[in-house]
Image (tube, rainbow, N blue to C red):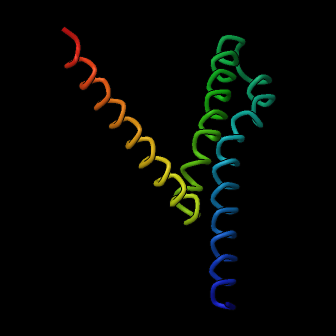
């Protein structure tokens, strides 16, 4: 039980560090936008803000990937979900092919 607890703590720390690093990298451009506004032309600033906004969305997209890599239970959940969706799609495809055969 103690070893399992240490494993969970380690997993939590790794996840927290990974999410924090990804967030820091993604938030840095938006955090620097006031500096860029002071030294760049208006046109450059507009492009920079668009870039900074885009990088913020990368953070949102990266979080599930970080969780998948670092959290074993999340990885198992996603794999199970993908299997269930795959089974549903195969059942639907069989239904579609069977219904098309029965039509004249």
Which of 28/72 is in front? 72
Name the one closer to the observer, 31 or 88.
88
Instruction: Tell me if residue 4 comes above or below residue 41 in the rendering.
Output: below
Q: Is residue 91 left or right of residue 39?
A: left
The vertical placement of 72 against 58, above or below, is below
Residue 37 at x, y = what percent?
Answer: 77, 22
Q: Residue 102, position in %: x, y? A: 22, 18
Q: Residue at x 68, y 15 (%)?
A: 46
Q: In which quarter of the image is the C terminus?
A: top left
| Image point (24%, 25%), residue name | 97
85 is higher (above) or lower (below) than 101: below
Q: Quadrant of the N terminus?
A: bottom right
Q: Which residue is drawn at 77% across and 37% down?
A: 31
Q: In terms of depth relative to the viewer, which is nearer, 22 or 75?
A: 75
- For residue 56, which quarter of the picture? top right
Q: Quadrant of residue 20?
A: bottom right
- Picture coordinates of residue 60 (x, y %)? 64, 39
Q: Nearer the viewer, residue 56 or 6?
A: 6
């Amino acid at each position: 039980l103690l070893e399992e607890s240490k494993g969970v703590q380690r997993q939590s720390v790794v996840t927290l560090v990974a999410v924090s690093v990804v967030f820091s990298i993604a938030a840095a451009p938006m955090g620097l936008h006031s500096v860029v506004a002071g030294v760049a032309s208006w046109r450059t600033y507009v492009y920079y803000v668009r870039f900074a906004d885009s990088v913020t969305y990368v953070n949102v997209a990266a979080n599930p990937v970080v969780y998948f890599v670092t959290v074993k239970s999340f990885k198992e959940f996603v794999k199970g979900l993908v299997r269930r969706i795959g089974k549903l799609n195969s059942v639907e495809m069989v239904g579609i092919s069977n219904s098309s055969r029965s039509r004249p």
